[in-house]
Amino acid sequence: MAHKASQRALELFAGKYNCAQSVFAACAGETGLGEAERLAVASAFGGGLARQGEVCGALTGALMALGEKQSAALAAGPVAARDAVYTQAAKLMEEFRAAHGSILCRELTGCLFSTEEGQRAFKEQDIRNKVCNKLVAFAAERAAGDERKSPNHIEG
């Protein structure tokens, strides 16, 4: 499933969707949310949270997917499930940082999307293909691959 999720995330990202939308939509859980709803929910998280250069949108999409996968457990035992999600999320964030050197969009891309100059540099320097594609694929693969049972996985 991890390869399938990263492939789908890259397809969405190559189209008209941002990094967060692409990863979250590609890492569908079993909550009944369809792709259109996932794309809508994650729409404000691209460009490092609403183009602010903060936490990478691909990582944010993956974190949302981790939380969604625990929805049944969260309903049954909110504190234990939330703590398990925190542990999984911290691990994912550390893996992302170790693999890419940062979790901040502005550091990863060298662009600040809240400015016209940053948006122009993103396009002119082909950052989408040179940098972001690998971040999207990595985040989707890790979020989808989280189905392997870890010590912190809680059954719903």
Image: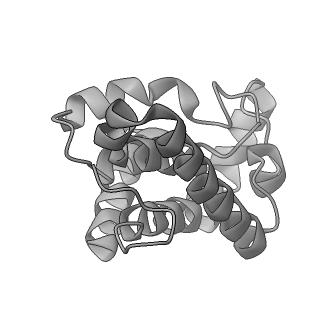
Where the N terminus falls, by quadrant?
A: bottom left
Left/right placement of residue 39 relative to residue 124 reads left
Of residues 125 and 24, the one drawn nearer to the viewer in this rendering: 24
Q: Identify the residue at horizontal 67%, vertical 28% (top origin).
A: 51
Task: Give residue 115's position: percent from left, percent from top.
Answer: 78, 25
The colour scheme is one colour
Left/right placement of residue 142 relative to residue 91 reads left
Of residues 19 and 146, the one drawn nearer to the viewer in this rendering: 146
Task: Give residue 150's position: percent from left, percent from top.
Answer: 47, 72
Q: Is residue 19 visible?
A: no
Left/right placement of residue 100 relative to residue 76 reads right
Q: Identify the residue at horizontal 55%, vertical 63% (top origin).
A: 129
Q: Identify the residue at horizontal 56%, vertical 31% (top origin).
A: 45
Eyeballing the image, is 39 above or below 87?
above
Total label count?
A: 0
Of residues 115 and 125, the one drawn nearer to the viewer in this rendering: 115
Q: Is residue 14 visible?
A: yes
Task: Give residue 92's position: percent from left, percent from top.
Answer: 61, 62
Task: Give residue 112's position: percent from left, percent from top.
Answer: 79, 36
Q: Identify the residue at horizontal 52%, vertical 68% (top origin).
A: 138
Of residues 96 and 136, the one drawn nearer to the viewer in this rendering: 96
Q: Would you identify the image quadrant in which residue 10 lies?
A: bottom left
Q: Would you identify the image quadrant in which residue 43 lies?
A: top left
Eyeballing the image, is 7 above or below 49?
below
